[in-house]
Amino acid sequence: VPAPWSNQDVGSINLTGSAFFNNGTFAVTGAGADVWGTADGFHYVSRPQTADGSITARVVRLDNTHTYAKAGIMLRGSLSRSAANVVLNVRPNGSVEFMSRPASGAATTFIATAGQTPPAWLRLTRAGTTVSAYVSANGTSWTRIGTVNISGMQLAGLLVTSHDLGVRNTGFGAVLPRPHKLPAPTCPASRSSSCRWGRVALPVQRRSRMSS
């Protein structure tokens, strides 16, 4: 993946994940136990993000490898499996989850939920120690579903976890200076039929209208 992005497996994964970037599109493949509890297992494509800002992603498709499979966005304190984090993800049934691990090794706390069948737009916005989560059906009108106070976030990026150590899932996203329409990418023939399509903007320089 292009600098300053990097990709890596985090925690308990069993099957090695991967990521590649081509023509503005990320393809992220990962297995992993879950993102929950006191330690995580997933594949992460991330870049440094220590200042205020936002990360926005559009998840277009999510296959049902497990009811708690996840594709979404994450702010994270480090690449340790037990690192503090803030997560906004969508599950195969269209449930959106906003969660946080407040400190390294602590239990993950469920903060809020929403329903948005893919395509689902997700956004995390950080201002100081306050992180707000937003969901949108169209990338224009946003609904805030919750906030959390947390410090020490060092990374921002995309996560994929299959919630099944024996199965990989693949997620797609295109990095953009700000959200705008793109055609959905085609799943590469060399990949499995399990594909998640989306797009990502980091940082967001201009904010769309938001409602709470």
Image (tube, grey):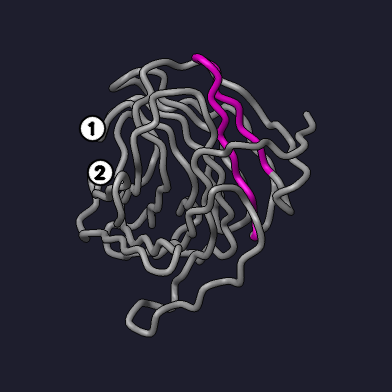
Q: Where residue 13 sits: x, y (%)?
A: 24, 52
Examine the image and state in which quarter residue 77 appears: top left
Residue 23 x %, y % = 43, 69
Q: Which residue is mark 1?
A: 80
> What's the distance in space between the residues labelled 2 and 1, CA to CA?
7 Å
> Residue 8's x, y, as percent?
24, 49
Q: Quadrant of residue 58?
A: bottom right
Q: Amino acid at mark 1?
A: Ser
Q: Residue furthest bottom?
A: 189
* Span shown in magenta: 119-135
Task: Identify the mark nearer the N-term, 2 or 1.
Answer: 2
Query: 110 above or below 160?
Result: above
What residue do we see at 57% from left, 57% from top? 59
Residue for badge 2:
10
Dominant SS of magenta comes to strand
* Dots 2, 1 in contact, CB < 8 A: yes
Q: Is residue 122 left or right of residue 168?
A: right
Quadrant the C terminus occupies: top right
Q: Is residue 196 left or right of residue 94?
A: left
Q: Secondary structure at mark 2?
A: strand
